[in-house]
Image (cartoon, helix red, strand yellow):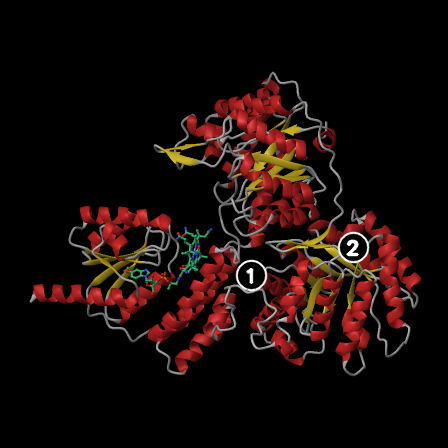
Amino acid sequence: MNITEYIKEHLLYLDGGMGTLLQGQGLLPGELPERWNLTHPEVITAIHRAYYDAGSNVVNTNTFGANSLKLSPEELEDVIRSAIANARRAAAESRGTQPKWVALDVGPTGRMLKPYGDFDFEEAVSVFATTVRLGVKHGADLILIETMNDSYETKAALLAAKENSDLPVFVSNAYGEDGKLMTGADPAAMVAMLEGMGADAIGVNCSLGPKALASVVEAYLRCSSIPVLLKPNAGLPRAMEGKTVYDVTPEEFAADVAALIKKGVRIAGGCCGTTPEYLSTLVKASREIAPVPIEPKNLTTVSSYTHAVCFSDAPILIGERINPTGKKRFREALLANDMDYLLKEGIAQEETGVQILDVNVGVPGLDEVGMLTRAVCELQAILDLPLQIDTANPVAMEAALRRYNGKALINSVNGKRESMEAVFPLAKKYGGLVVALTLDESGIPQRAEGRLAIARRILTCAKKYGLDKKDLLFDPLALTVSADGNAARETLRAVGLIREELGCHTSLGVSNVSFGLPARDAINGTFFALALGQGLSAAIMNPYSAEMMKTYYAYRALSGLDKNCQGYMDFASTLPQSAPAAAPVAAEMSGKGEDNLSPLQHAVVKGLKEQSARLAGELLDRGAEPLEIVREEIIPALNLVGQGFESKRVYLPQLLMSAEAAKSAFEVIKGRFAGKQTTDKCTFVIATVKGDIHDIGKNIVKLILENYGFCVIDLGRDVPAEVIAEEAIRTHAPIVGLSALMTTTVPAMEETIALLRQKAPWCKIIVGGAVLNRDYANAIGADQYAKDAMDAVRYAQRIDEDLKRSHD
Ligand code: B1M
């Protein structure tokens, strides 16, 4: 039986943990479990069989990490072939009578994708594609993409599955205790993207126990129109006497999962720490529960890599400023490849409170395909607003949609056959909400009824491509009122008709209405208010226009969309007449606001690499001391980002971009030191300890030490204690410096000190890093604590002088 048909009527049971069971069977730390398909097929088959016997309908092949990054092409094929064969054999041997399927299990690559890491998106797609093709070749029934903690990698995997197979694809993400993926996505964002791309079932696995995942699962159930799956751990893993243990018992697990099945989960199994016993207990506890019907939610949404924006009664603002039309400076910037200009425009609009940004880079003579893709990627590296990809070029549209991390707003399709044939397949493949302009081969109908008729035809055609009315946002076109006195009225009527007759959401490029008139803002603001009154869902608009923003906030307050008028009051406090403490409309990041930041601090906080480097250079040119720039500019900016991160107002990608921006400023500072150094002092081995990848502070300490004449041997970051000890012995270094930035890595520092005491007892050990203080340094056995780079230099100088004296 076809599994997608089966889940329409039945609950579907997946299997439980594999890795934890293999450890129990003797899998050694560091050994690739996937190789056991070849070396221990009977063990793998027995585990699969035990799950089928327990009542699982689907077992996942033992291929979680089977990919071309870890295995040679031949070995990869052998592993996947045998993994599927082992699962098939288990299905044949099992005494269970339930329908059975074999899922090709696809886990994360283990590499971070750009911009957070160095792994290219298309490379990731190609790694997953290889695994998927082998799964298809060797007869998997479906693909289960699981334990993904980054939305971009999830997209790469799903795209690869869709492009290389016709099999059903289930996608499952691993959420943290904060209810978000590691890179910041919330459930609504993941549902929007994955459902848009055509996953057959979506959900949640690993990380926590079923109770702790309940709120995430419930969020999925609220948004998803496709089956939701749940495959939790037997609780949060914790270490006890050198072993990983799980606290949730099979009975508790089954009861908690069953409770979520009653709320609508349709596919259930277990992850780490669960065993066939958990599965059989779950099957017994839940098989009599009538499956909750899967209702279409009809949500019109777009998403970024962190959150979804849902079109409803509350109007959505789409910032129109990233568009070179009529903007000479912007055109020049694009032709000169000046990305900072575009990024600054994005940041400035975000600060006005818009929810979506339009991105248009169409300039004659410019490679629009390359530029639009780059603009989308770079904007997404520093901003988490959903984007509207605005181009008439289908090739550029596809390239940008492919790289977009989330579900984009696509601007636009129209009623011309050619346009629909080009745009709808892209929206179907990549997911996306399509702005549909009510014009066709005959132009724009004058009357609202004509535009409604085109909207109907667009809707009918969209359905043929598998798109629904929730996937379209109709734009009945604002025409210039100075050229036609009825223009605004007909557009407003069309907004109302489309809403009432088709039940669809609408959007308007508002500013066009006032073209050719003076004081355009007054016309725009009033037109916007009238359109909102007709039920307009969204406006592509100039967010710097005071009139538009006044209309927006006032409308929300007047129509009961603004609880206690709080949004309006916040906005009003920024208006000039109530000035003295005027703050930007901006969502503030630091609590105190970002207004007081210097330009360099602002650039670091916002993650603008090129600008940070340029500003650091300018400060140096004006005679600022390099160390002062580090101390007064870069560190406070990073501290601000760190605070934002801690209080969950900044996510990992933004933290990374700020780190990159800080590094680029630092590189410029370092460049000015180059060539000025002479080495007349002793050797200083420096490293960030095992488990810790923070190296900005360590690099500063290194630079300053070199500048003071020390011969610094930098072992880098995440360095094991043994490597540090070996280097200290090899160079007979009199000083070793260790850096650690996290409470979790201080123990590694302590271990390193203990090893150095044993292997290189002559070494003086100096430690630093934001998480340490003098008492802590003493407690872990260091000789010296340094609060900053100069502290480290002063201590090293003392040691060097002592050494020289003892040699004299
Ligand atoms: Co992360 N990070 N980070 N991070 N990060 C912190 C440290 C954190 C405090 C942020 C927060 O939550 N508020 C937090 C640690 C919490 C804790 O344990 N108390 C944290 C976390 C949790 C994490 C991750 C786990 C996040 C995640 O993945 N969920 C992850 C860790 C990965 C890992 O290490 N295994 C992570 C990742 C990252 C980035 C990669 C994004 C990036 C690092 C990039 C890089 O270094 N290449 C990053 C950044 C930038 C930070 C913050 C924002 C800034 C750190 C920094 O560079 N400061 C930081 C928050 C904060 O500290 N405000 C944060 C500037 C630097 C010049 O200062 O390193 O202290 P510092 O160095 C100073 C002095 O301390 C001293 O001199 C330097 C110059 O004055 N010093 C020494 C340092 N080492 C010395 C050695 C010496 C002498 C002096 O002698 C040898």
Instruction: Give the quadrant of residue 130.
Output: top right
235 or 59: nearer the eye?
235
**Residue that mark 1 sits on:** 381
Q: Percent x, y for residue 328? A: 67, 80
**Residue 32, position in %: x, y?**
44, 36
Relative to residue 120, is residue 327 depicted above or below? Answer: below
State how many labels appear: 2
Say which mark, if any, is on residue 472. Answer: 2
Residue name at image x 65 percent, y 62 percent? 566
In percent of width and height, residue 352 lies at: 63, 69
Name the residue: 73% across, 67% down.
554
Q: Quadrant of residue 278?
A: top right
Judged from the image, the secondary structure of the residue bearing numbered disc 1 is helix
Residue 589 in view, yes or no: yes
User: What is the three-letter code of the residue carrying label 1?
Assistant: Ala
Q: Residue furthest front?
A: 564
- Which class describes the residues within 10 Å of circle 2: few (<14), some (14-19), or many (20+)? many
- Which mark is drawn over residue 657? none
Q: Locate residue 442 relative to residue 296 in the image: left or right.
A: right
**In which quadrant of the rendered image does the N terminus lie?**
top right
Q: What type is the residue that disc 2 sits on?
A: Leu
